[in-house]
């Protein structure tokens, strides 16, 4: 009798052509909507219908063996919302994401971690202007934690140091992204979801592929010392940065201490 794993693999293989066709159709719809929205100034960039198509691609991609597509689609969701408009530069950035997904779909295989990382590095940042286009030399910060007011307050300080920011609110997705994309620095909120910042930092640090990536846990002023004590019990090497008014100074010191800049 075939194992459950074999049955699942056979089912995925059988449904793969339908997934490919669905992604191609949705990409065409996204492209058409974006071009149309660029001519309709009253349309908001967080259009539910537009984001629904991108989210559907992201949700199915990993199940069908295309984790790079899932990461690009996730980045595209954030990009659409963060750009805040459908001006020409924003439309160009969105279409770059669409084309990157289309190339992978046409090849019928995921490019793998190294090539997938290169593809992600080639995509424009959340503020698409010629001066801020990402280059191969630009460093990336992966933030794992809630997309809330604290992230919005920290974001200008992070970008001011020349980093490109990628944010994931789910702890497990954040760990997977860290392994697949290997960013230059990882910021982890102490409060996330089922795992806290120390747990996530520990899991990233023990993984061979990510153990050398500099890690910072961001905590409130009240929690900073207890979080630091927990991290020291894990062997040290992971810094704590305080949120709020202390963030800018703490973050600058951490970058120097970790030799990131």
Image (tube, rainbow, N blue to C red):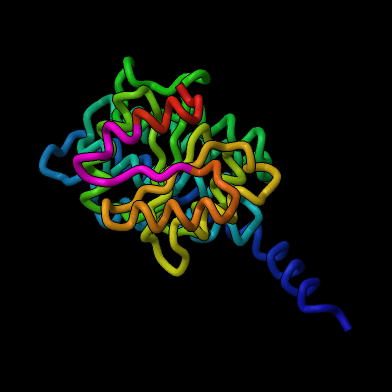
> Residue at the spot x=61%, y=48% of the render?
205
Quarter of the image that includes the N terminus: bottom right
**Observer able to see residue 162:** yes
Q: Position of residue 135 (x, y in %)?
A: 47, 19
Q: In this rendering, does residue 54 appear at all?
A: no
In front of the other: 220 or 187: 220
Residue closest to the eye, 257 or 217: 257
Vertical position of residue 14 compared to residue 216: above or below: below
Residue at (19, 40) in percent of width and height: 245
Q: Is residue 143 left or right of residue 4?
A: left
Q: Position of residue 66 (x, y in %)?
A: 62, 50
Q: How many marks?
A: 0
View extreme (top): residue? 131
Q: Is residue 172 above or below residue 213?
A: below
What span is in magenta? 239-251
What secondary structure prevails in the magenta region? helix
x and y percent of residue 155 in the render?
A: 28, 37
Asked where in the image residue 65 lies, by quadrant, the reply is bottom right
Percent of width and height locating residue 29: 38, 47
In this rendering, position of residue 173 left or right of residue 244: right
- In the rendered image, the residue lying farthest to the bottom is 1
Q: Nearer the viewer, residue 61 or 190?
A: 190
Q: Is 62 situated left or right of 6 in this image?
A: left
Residue drawn at (34%, 40%), measured in percent from left and top? 79
Most extreme residue toward the right, as rendered?
A: 1
Membership of 241 in magenta stretch: yes
In this rendering, position of residue 237 left or right of residue 257:
right
* Quarter placement of the C terminus: top left
Is 60 contained in the magenta span? no
């Amino acid at each position: 009798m075939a194992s459950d794993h074999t049955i699942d693999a056979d089912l995925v293989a059988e449904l793969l052509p339908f997934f490919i066709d669905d992604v191609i159709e949705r990409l065409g719809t996204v492209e058409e909507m974006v071009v149309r929205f660029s001519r309709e100034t009253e349309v908001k960039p967080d259009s539910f219908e537009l984001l629904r198509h991108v989210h559907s691609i992201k949700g199915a991609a990993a199940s069908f063996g295309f984790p790079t597509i899932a990461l690009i689609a996730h980045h595209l969701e954030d990009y659409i919302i963060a750009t805040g408009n459908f001006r020409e530069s924003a439309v160009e950035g969105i279409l770059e994401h669409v084309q990157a997904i289309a190339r992978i779909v046409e090849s019928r295989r995921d490019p793998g971690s190294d090539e997938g990382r290169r593809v992600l590095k080639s995509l424009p940042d959340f503020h698409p202007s010629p001066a801020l286009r990402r280059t191969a030399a630009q460093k990336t910060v992966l933030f794992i934690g809630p997309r809330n007011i604290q992230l919005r307050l920290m974001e200008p300080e992070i970008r001011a140091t020349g980093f490109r920011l990628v944010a994931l609110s789910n702890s497990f997705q954040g760990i997977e992204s860290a392994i697949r994309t290997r960013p230059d620095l990882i910021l982890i909120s102490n409060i996330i979801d089922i795992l806290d910042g120390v747990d996530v930092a520990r899991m990233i640090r023990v993984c061979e592929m990510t153990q050398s990536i500099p890690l910072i846990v961001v905590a409130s002023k009240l929690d900073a010392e207890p979080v630091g004590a927990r991290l020291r019990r894990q062997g040290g090497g992971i810094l704590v940065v305080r949120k709020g008014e202390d963030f800018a100074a703490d973050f600058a010191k951490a970058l120097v201490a970790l030799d990131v800049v």
